[in-house]
Amino acid sequence: MRLADFILRDTEAILAQWEAFAATLLPAAAGVKSLALRDHAQQILEAIAKDLSTSQTREAQAEKSMGRAPRLIDAHETAAQTHAFLRARGGFNIKQLAAEYRALRASVLRLWIDECQPTVPNMDDMIRFNEAIDQAVAESVGSFSAHVDQARNLLLGMLGHDMRSPLQTIQMTASYLAALNAGEKVTEAAARLIRSGARMQALVDDLSDYNRTRLGLGINIVPSNVDLEAVFADEVDQLRAAHPDRRVDLDVLGNTQGVWDGQRLQQLLGNLVLNAIKYGAPDAPVRVSVTGEDAEVRFEVRNSGPVIEQSVLERIFDPLRRGEGLDDTYDAGRSLGLGLYIASEIAIAHNGETEARSDASETVFSVRLPRGQ
């Protein structure tokens, strides 16, 4: 018997084994009704049977083996994708999801081979069946991961949002205590609260920006007419005050007027300079150069220090990553490893781009900003 005919004829027996195995996936399966345990299993089996009955070229077989099977016209999602979404929402984990397909593969082949005895099973059917199962696994894992990522980012976004109010209260209270002149000890304690609050605020802001980008919303900007020289001079002054032991130079050449979000560009520059201060040679200056051209403004942040390998440079703007040799510690709670990523996203929000290069003489982060409309 051909495998497609067997699947359609014995669907109920296969579903019974699917349900029995799904019921063992605890604790998510506890109390789940039969219909939910069988969720979209019948549609998945029907899709596999239809695939087995459809002629397939070698090229199509190769595409499917790489998870690129053709999508049905007007199909919003496959049964495997819907199944994965509902499993994720029901509290199943990705290992349990994969285990369902492993058990399905084994039970279908075992039942079919027993049915074929004493005849030898069709080997092409077996190969095509394994391809179809692998395609369903790829679709399910992709859908499951996307749902989990979305849920996590929404949770982190809400957490960052809800932390703002109590954090602002702490900062306001600390500022009030500092203004009371209630003694040196109280003033020092208030100053520590203010500094800690500022660091926490920076972390919350980074977290909120990160989640906006992961949710596909991008960095929020409010463009207006800006003189980049004045904006950067103010940011550099603040950085010098925060790091009095480090030298930060600023050189400006040409027209620096444009339509940008000034506060966001201060944040971009601040992230690049702080990165240079953190990883650059402590006895060498950090140099910021700004050049205004006809259609755009370019600026660079340069520092001396260890060479960053090319493999690290290629991913240096990725979120939550630090390359080898760039200190994998959490930096005493001061950083989430998002500074360079957010700097890059701010540039993208302005239709600009960021680049990094490094050699024995220096490391350079460069930004190109169209003047905007």
Image (tube, grey):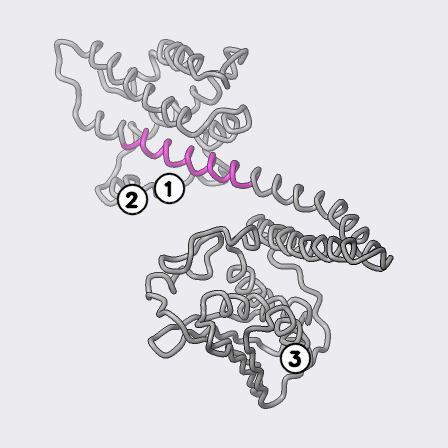
Q: Does 194 sit left or right of 113 as displayed?
A: right
N-term mark: 1 or 2: 2
Q: Is residue 344 visible?
A: yes
Q: Do the residues labelled 2 and 3 touch (CB within 8 Å)?
A: no
Q: Quadrant of residue 152?
A: top right
Residue under the point 55% across and 74% down: 246
**Is 167 inside the magenta-drawn segment?**
no
Q: In which quarter of the image is residue 166?
A: top right
Q: What element carries label 1?
A: loop
**Residue kind at label 3, given as amino acid type:** Ala
Q: How far apart are marks 2 and 3 (CA)?
A: 55 Å
Magenta-highlighted stretch: main secondary structure?
Answer: helix
Q: How far apart are marks 3 and 1 (CA)?
A: 55 Å
**Which residue was labeled with disc 2?**
63
**Which residue was labeled with disc 3?**
233
Residue 204: where, in percent of width, then height?
64, 51
Q: Are marks 3 and 1 in contact (CB under 8 Å)?
A: no
Q: Does 129 sit left or right of 344 as displayed?
A: left
Residue 339: where, in percent of width, then height?
54, 60
**Does 33 appear above or below 67?**
above
Extreme residue in the right direction: 180
In-front residue for pair 54/270: 270
Identify the magenta region.
131-150
Extreme residue in the front direction: 184
**Which residue was labeled with disc 1?**
70
**Does 229 appear above or below 116?**
below
Q: Which mark is residue 18?
A: none
Q: What element carries label 2?
A: helix
In-front residue for pair 154/356: 356
Q: Tell me the mark number nearer the camera, choosing from 3 and 1.
A: 3
Q: Do the residues labelled 1 and 2 touch (CB within 8 Å)?
A: yes
